[in-house]
Amino acid sequence: MDRDRARRLLGVEPDSSPTELRRAYRSMMRRHHPDVAPDDPAATGRASDLSAAYTVLSSPEADPSIEHPMRPAPDPPPHTEIRADGAVIVEAPGPETFMRVHDALETIGDVTYRDRSSGFLQAIIQPANGPLCTMAVAIEARAVDSLVLVSLDSMDSNDAPPIEPILQEIARLVATD
């Protein structure tokens, strides 16, 4: 439905305010709604047309003459850094870091335990040419970033593989949208 037809249906002028538009819509609906005129077979169609007209006129997206402020761009993915002690710093709040680390662990293994309130995750992974391992991840939310602590233990009698490549993969996945 175009805007001119919608204005004619509701009986409003092009420069009508949102309040005037709402009043006109309500007034017309009180007269033409199927509950008010149950014996009128055309009442449902008229009410539907009135609703469509109100939607067209009350929606700023439907009016090309209205200037719309630019929508903000989505936040970029957080920066990550692997510290010398093996911790990963994620420049994001705790809940976002938890979600991103969870998704990263789901990509490289199977998350077997999650506790959002304590910021703890556990996963089973199998690094390339390595033994099956359990990975425990603790996320500590701080003022401007989050600290991600990771431990890796082999599930069999072999030594756990080096953790650095796994930390790099987690950091890469966390910093990717």
Image (cartoon, helix red, strand yellow):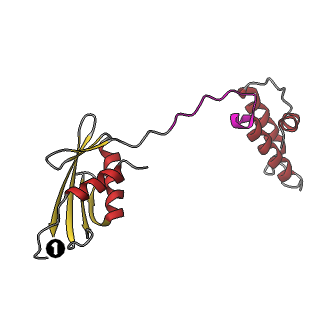
- Magenta stretch bounds: 58-73
Helix, strand or loop for the magenta stretch, by majority: loop
Query: Which residue type does callout 1 highlight?
Result: Met
Q: Mark 1 points at which residue?
A: 155
Tell me the element at label 1: loop
User: What residue is shown at x 84% (from left), y 40% (from top)?
Assistant: 2
Q: Where is residue 33 in the image (x, y as percent from the top left)?
A: 80, 47
| Above or below, comparing residue 114 to residue 82 in the picture | below
Q: Where is residue 112 in the image (x, y as percent from the top left)?
A: 27, 67
| Above or below, comparing residue 28 to residue 35 in the picture | above
| Above or below, comparing residue 134 to residue 13 in the picture | below
Q: Is residue 48 magenta?
A: no
Q: Does the magenta stretch include residue 63?
A: yes
| Residue 70 relative to residue 75: left or right | right
Answer yes or no: is residue 99 visible.
no
Q: Where is residue 160 in the image (x, y as percent from the top left)?
A: 14, 67
Answer yes or no: is residue 158 visible.
yes
Q: Position of residue 138 (x, y in %)?
A: 20, 53
- Considering depth in this image, is 39 or 25 the residue closer to the camera? 25
User: What residue is shown at x 24% (from left), y 73% (from top)?
Assistant: 129
